[in-house]
Amino acid sequence: DRTVKIAPSILSADFADFGREIQAIEAQGADWVHVDVMDGHFVPNLTFGPPAVKAFRPHVKTVMDVHLMISPVDAYIDAYAEAGADILTAHLEAGPHSHRTLQAIRGAGMKAGLALNPGTPAEAVEHLLDLTDLICVMTVNPGFGGQKFIDMTDKIRKLSAMIGDRPVHIEIDGGVDPSTAPLVVEAGADVLVAGSAVFRGGSVDKAEVYGENIAAI
Ligand code: DX5
Ligand code: ZN
């Protein structure tokens, strides 16, 4: 299904209120919930691990899309399966054996995603496409929400051509807002992660605010 989906990143949510934040964005039209796991090593920021992701699970009625910004990955795959991830995305740059990692993710019963930092070329995934359900094109250097969009439309076009008829999503992560979303969709993206653009302005009426922001993207 290549209809464009919005996956709000709870990296920009209230960390003391994840359950309510997840419910609010889903009630307002989020298609997936994007969960950013950072280890303070692969990226210079630290968020949460499997026990927290497991605690999010009952609140997520749509799809829990877990983006691992950690290295190494393989030792944690079973823990994220057990935590209830639907999609588990690892970075190509996180280790030398992406092929093995993708097989292990599928073997644990999840959809397998592969993320690419801005400096990594499209061609790097060519021999991995049959093992992959989603390619995540980073349009910021991973680690923080609220950064400026880096134009990767050329990479998205190349990936889209390489993917052809395969059922592989192209997800865009970083700096997606109402001004950048049309560029990446035009280039071939079908899943848009958005953190600051969705959660900006959260308040007691947060559900309504999120709905407006989601609709704007
Ligand atoms: C960045 C994360 C993103 C981030 C996006 O390392 O992977 O998912 O939350 O945030 P915005 O939309 O604010 O750039
Ligand atoms: Zn992310």
Image (spheres, grey):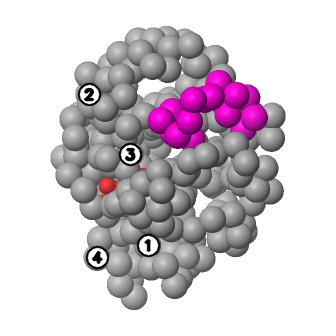
The residue beneath circle 2 is: 153
Task: Check the image and report above or below for 175 versus 89.
Answer: below
Q: Which residues are magenta?
A: 90-106
Q: How many marks?
A: 4
In the rendering, at what x and y percent does residue 85 appear? 69, 52
The residue beneath circle 1 is: 13
Is ligand 2 less than 8 Å from the beta carbon at label 3? yes
Nearer-N-terminus badge (4/2): 2
Task: Check the image and report above or below for 106 versus 121.
Answer: below
Q: Helix, strand, or loop for circle 2?
A: helix
Q: Amino acid at mark 3?
A: Asp
The numbered mark at residue 201 is: 4
In the rendering, at what x and y percent does residue 95 appear? 56, 36
Q: CA distance from mark 3 to mark 4?
A: 20 Å
Nearer-N-terminus badge (3/2): 2
Q: Nearer the viewer, mark 4 or mark 2?
A: 2
> Which is more toward the observer, 203 or 135?
135
Using the rendered view, name the quadrant where residue 1 is placed. top right
Q: What residue is shown at x 20% (from left), y 52% (from top)?
A: 148
| Residue 50 can be seen in this image | yes
Q: Helix, strand, or loop for circle 1?
A: loop
The residue beneath circle 3 is: 173
Q: Amino acid at mark 1?
A: Ala
Q: Helix, strand, or loop for circle 3?
A: strand
Task: Check the image and report above or below for 74 versus 168.
Answer: below
Q: CA distance from mark 1 to mark 2?
A: 28 Å
In the rendering, at what x and y percent does residue 160 appear? 41, 18
Q: CA distance from mark 3 to mark 2?
A: 12 Å
